[in-house]
């Protein structure tokens, strides 16, 4: 569920999101529900993800209406994982308790940094104190599965060890650590180009990422995907489905879906979406494109890409020239079921993947 509303736009962000009036928010929820009602699929839904934007900007009652619509139109698995992305300053203890009652069982906080000057620099609307309080509130509301998004590569962090230990102590079970992508056209991109802000160099960012890797490992956070780390048993089921090229339906403006080998997407313009949610763009993937996605997404994970699935596309690593070369120098490995990149080579995953799909 894409919820495209934010209190204000962060300086680095180019997601389809922005500040809209309550009137638009209400119309959007009505349209989202109409879109959900337009599906009648009997497949079991095993994960639901409210992303954005900032879904927590809506009221708990808004979220309840959406969940009800999903329940009315889909079969929901007994152990369904339901995640909601929250900005630390838009969730109170009361709202979190309501989420819990609705069956939401995973909270994802956009914390980004525990340094107030970094938060200010990137235009976040919350500070460190609010972020920590939000995590404490999530625990008080009874959530056991809590993710925190971190944004690295901005300014050197001398407190990596203290930050990660603190997050773990507060009950965080999953960390997504993203390296900042300077998106063209964003205020941060323009400031950096005009030398009005000095960000870390590529080398400094890599060094910092390696420090994070060390500390995360020391604290029991297992790197199960290039940017994702979790304590035992807390992998994000929703994202695993993407990485395994499973099927999914996206609802809302700019949402993408993948069903029966066809990828389709909604318009990125909120007014167009409100006028006609049904205007979708379809893209039928060729067998080669499906294979490339399978390799590209699967190799992002520690587990790797399934040999059985590769075989469906007649891809046999032991008969592929490039794969053999990469295997011989130890950049990729193979076990009984999967082809994978060893985690020490995750830093050059893109180059390895490109070689494999060449
Ligand atoms: C949709 S946002 C998360 C929820 C909420 N909007 C928030 O920011 O608190 C998903 C995550 O993507 C990451 N992200 C956004 N823009 C990014 C960029 N330019 N480079 C790297 N990561 C980015 C941030 O860590 C953010 O928390
Ligand atoms: S990072 Fe999150 S809160 Fe900030 S503008 Fe983007 S979607 Fe909104």
Image (cartoon, rainbow, N blue to C red):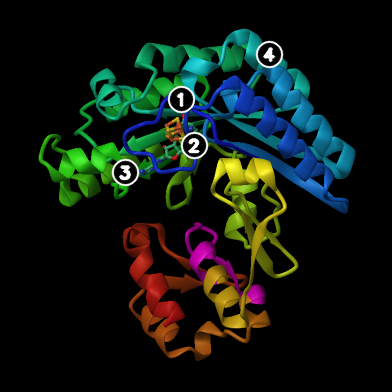
Up/down of 94 relative to 271, above or below: above
Instruction: Describe the element under mark 2 as helix, strand or loop.
Output: loop
**Mark with earlier residue (1, 2):** 2
> Which quadrant of the structure image shows residue 341?
bottom left
Up/down of 184 relative to 314, above or below: above
Up/down of 172 relative to 327, above or below: above
Question: How far apart, in angstroms, are the residues tagged by discs 2 and 3?
Answer: 18 Å
Q: Which residues are magenta?
A: 295-309
**Mark with earlier residue (2, 3):** 2
**Mark with earlier residue (3, 4):** 4
Q: Nearer the viewer, residue 341 or 26?
A: 26
Q: Nearer the viewer, residue 170 or 83?
A: 83
The residue carrying mark 2 is: 17
Q: Give left or right: position of 223 versus 83.
A: left
Q: Give left or right: position of 313 versus 194.
A: right
Question: How far apart, in angstroms, are the residues tagged by discs 3 and 1?
Answer: 23 Å
> Which quadrant of the structure image shows residue 77?
top right
Whether ligand 1 has any atom under 8 Å from the Cβ at mark 3 is answered as yes
The residue carrying mark 3 is: 180
Percent position (x, y) of residue 111?
42, 26
Instruction: Write the residue at 79% across / 40% down.
Output: 34
Q: Is residue 144 visible?
A: no
Question: How far apart, in angstroms, are the residues tagged by discs 1 and 2?
Answer: 30 Å
The residue carrying mark 1 is: 168
Depth check, mark 1 against mark 4: the one in front is: 4
Instruction: Describe the element under mark 3 as helix, strand or loop.
Output: loop
Question: How far apart, in angstroms, are the residues tagged by discs 3 and 4?
Answer: 32 Å
Depth check, mark 2 against mark 3: the one in front is: 2
Depth check, mark 4 against mark 2: the one in front is: 2
The residue carrying mark 4 is: 97
Q: Are marks 3 and 4 in contact (CB under 8 Å)?
A: no
Looking at the rendered image, the quarter that the C terminus falls into is bottom left
């Amino acid at each position: 569920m894409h919820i495209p509303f934010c209190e204000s736009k962060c300086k680095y962000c180019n997601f389809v999101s922005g500040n809209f009036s309550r009137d638009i928010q209400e119309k959007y929820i009505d349209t989202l529900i109409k879109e959900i009602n337009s599906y009648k699929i009997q497949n079991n839904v095993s994960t639901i993800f409210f992303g954005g934007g900032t879904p927590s900007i809506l009221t708990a009652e808004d979220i309840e209406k959406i969940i009800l619509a999903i329940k009315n139109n889909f079969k929901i698995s007994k152990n369904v994982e339901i995640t909601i992305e929250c900005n630390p300053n838009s969730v109170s203890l009361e709202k979190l308790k309501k989420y819990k009652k609705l069956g939401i069982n995973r909270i994802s906080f956009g914390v980004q940094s525990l340094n107030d000057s970094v938060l200010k620099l990137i235009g976040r609307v919350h500070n460190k104190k609010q972020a920590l309080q939000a995590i404490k509130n999530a625990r008080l509301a009874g959530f056991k599965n809590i993710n925190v998004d971190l944004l690295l590569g901005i300014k050197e962090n001398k407190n990596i060890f203290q930050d990660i230990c603190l997050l773990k102590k507060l009950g965080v079970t999953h960390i997504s650590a993203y390296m900042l992508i300077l998106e063209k056209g964003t205020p941060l991109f323009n400031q950096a180009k005009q030398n009005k802000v000095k960000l870390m160099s590529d080398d400094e960012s890599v060094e910092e990422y390696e420090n994070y890797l060390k500390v995360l490992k020391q604290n029991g956070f297992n790197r199960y995907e290039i940017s994702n780390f979790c304590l035992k048993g807390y992998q994000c089921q929703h994202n695993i489905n993407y990485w395994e090229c499973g099927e999914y339906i996206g609802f809302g403006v700019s949402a993408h879906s993948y069903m029966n080998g066809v990828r389709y997407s909604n318009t990125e313009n909120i007014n167009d979406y409100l006028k006609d949610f049904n205007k979708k763009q379809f893209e039928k993937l060729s067998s080669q494109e499906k294979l490339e996605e399978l390799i590209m997404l699967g190799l992002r994970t520690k587990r790797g890409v399934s040999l059985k699935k590769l075989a469906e596309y007649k891809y046999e690593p032991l008969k592929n020239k490039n794969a053999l070369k990469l295997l011989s120098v130890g950049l990729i490995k193979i076990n009984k079921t999967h082809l994978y990149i060893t985690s020490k080579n995750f830093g050059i995953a893109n180059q390895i993947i490109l070689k494999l799909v060449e």
